[in-house]
Structure formats: C-alpha cells, structure tokens
Image: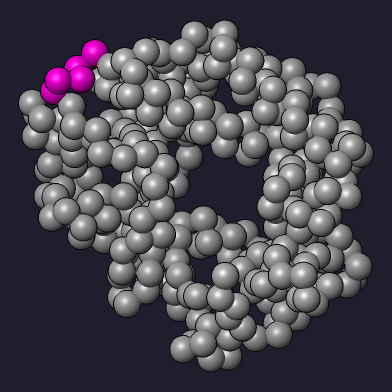
Amino acid sequence: MQRKPYPEFSWSLSRHKSMIDCARKYGLSYYASHNGWFRDSSEFAKEAYRLKKITNLPILFGQEVHDMIESVINHYLATSNIPDEDRLTTHIRNQLNRAFRDSVKGYNDWFQRPNKFNMLHEIYYGGKLRQEAIEKIEERLDVCITNFLNSDSFRDLTERRSEIEFLESEQFRTMEIEGVKVFVVIDVLYKDLINDKWVIVDWKTGKESLEDRHQLAIYAMYLSQKFGARLDQIQLRNEYLLTGDCRVHELNESDLMNVYHIMKHSLVEMGKFLVDEDENKPVDLSLFPKTEYIQKCDRCNFRQICERDD
C-alpha cells in the first residue's frame, strides 16, 4: 500500500454528517487516523485509527444484516435456492457473539490489528452490554430477516427473475461533482425490464430518517452520470426491515438540486479545515472545534482522546 502524507479528499453523506455532528470527531476520523495502520506511524495516529474502528451493537447488527442480504442474493442468483430462515438467524447471532468475544477476551488482538478484530463501544467504554440492549437486538433479528425475505425487492429478484436484470450489490463506486470524488455504495441495483426502470434498493435496519431521501438522491445522481438514466426511469426504494414497509420514491430535479446545494455548502465548510486544498493538508487538530452538545460525547469513539485533552 502506497503511503501518502494526507488522505485523498472525497465527499460522502456520511463524511458530511460526521462534520456536522462534531468537527473534532471529523478531524480525528478523517485526518488524525490517517496512516494509523502502519507500524511505524505515531502512537497518536495509531490510537485514532484504533478508536475509529470501534463499532457499537446497533451499527454492527445493521452491517451483519446487510452482509447477510448480499450473501443471500448472490447465493440465490447462483443456485436458485434461498437459505432457511433459522440458518440466517443463527449465522447473524454467531457473528454478533464473535464480536462480543473479541471485545471481552481479545483486547490485545484488537489493539494490534483493529481492522481484523471487533471492539464494541459499549464494552470498551462501559465494560459490558446492557441486557435490554441485547434483548432489543434479539427482537430485531427475527423481524428483520422475516421482513427481508418477504420484502417487495427480494420478491422481485426471486419471483420475477426473467423480468429482472440484476446489476450489482454493495459495490463501492465513485462519481465526480464539481471536481470532487463522491463515494457511493448502493445496496442493490437492478433493472426492471418490463417497466423500463432502474431500481435502487436501500435496506434499513433502523427507523426512518429525513436524510434517507438525500441518500437516494445521491444514488440517482450516480445513475444519471454513469449510465445516462433519466430521472423518470429511476425508482428508489427504502426497505425498512423493522416494520416491513417499502417506501418507493421517484425524485425530480428539485430533489437533486437540494442535495447538490447541501454538498456545495458542505465542501465550503470542509475547506475551512484545510491549510492546503491541493494536498488535503488539514489545520492543526486543535482548530477542529468540539461539539457544544456534550451529550453526544458518550456515544463517540474518540471519547478518550477528548477527555484526556480536557
């Protein structure tokens, strides 16, 4: 891996939300942690990188469900078989249990290789998982798997196979807007050949959010730029696995303009933290202000750094 003094500048909705949430967290996550995976990096860079890799139970659960969905779809397309629901439940439960064991018994392994082992925020900072948090995930597990298997989008792929052209799932893609690389990861993309639609599916294991529509608009921009798809040819879906609801969106130009303006403003704000835009060299970390909403700090991966600096 080629070593660079500063990370490549790029934009994503998650990066934007990180900056809005807390500029100090943004600086630690995207700049201070850079190169922290190299053995000869500074101890501070390695610490920031380790802390960046911490996850929490809801986020880990969402990732495991997404991984399971990708695996099930690929397995079905290759074999025309759908794994048993109990088998899927057991697989995800085993993955969550492994993360728990890593966090409790594998601290030294995680400390040395944080990209290979799990560390749960609840255990790192709190010492344990609360029973109510475990029970909440257990309840969500069965519901999410059942609702995925019965979802409109999965049934499209299985029951309308001859009418569907599957294109990709969970692939990192990029596009350029205003000369800036924008990262896009679409959960599922396929073409509905009968209705002449590009269908984008975004699986959600949490509650509905106002930002969900913004995410879909970015996906639509990607399809328009990369494939020349018209907006009236693009159908965007949020599959909410907790409730089983499928929200179908067909966006217009104003939706895209709203996201474009959010991005433009975001880029201006990000630029304020740079000494050299060409190299993406940041200002000193002390110039990334901490959030005023200290209640957010309890959930932050970088708590120990900020607490040490206070």
Residue 307 against residue 7 in the figure, above or below: above
- Residue 181 image point, x, y percent: 38, 69
The residue sitting at 69% across, 52% down in the picture is 115
Q: How is the image coloured?
A: one colour
On whether residue 261 falls in the magenta region, the answer is: no
The residue sitting at 75% across, 26% down in the picture is 97
Q: In this view of the protein, which residue sits in the foreground, 199 or 271?
A: 199
Position of 110 compared to 14: left or right?
Answer: right
Residue 160 against residue 220 in the figure, above or below: above
Q: Quadrant of the C terminus?
A: bottom right
Q: Quadrant of the N terminus?
A: bottom right
- Residue 258 image point, x, y percent: 31, 59
- Residue 41 image point, x, y percent: 76, 76
The residue sitting at 13% across, 55% down in the picture is 228
Q: In this view of the protein, which residue sits in the foreground, 248 or 93?
A: 93
- Residue 281 image point, x, y percent: 58, 86
Position of 255 compared to 34: left or right?
Answer: left
Asked whether residue 163 appears in the rendered view, the answer is: yes
Query: How many labels, in total?
Result: 0
Magenta segment, principal secondary structure? Answer: helix
- Quarter residue 167 falls in: top left
Asked whether residue 292 appears in the rendered view, the answer is: no
Please report the bounds of the magenta region as a residue range: 159-163
The residue sitting at 69% across, 22% down in the picture is 94
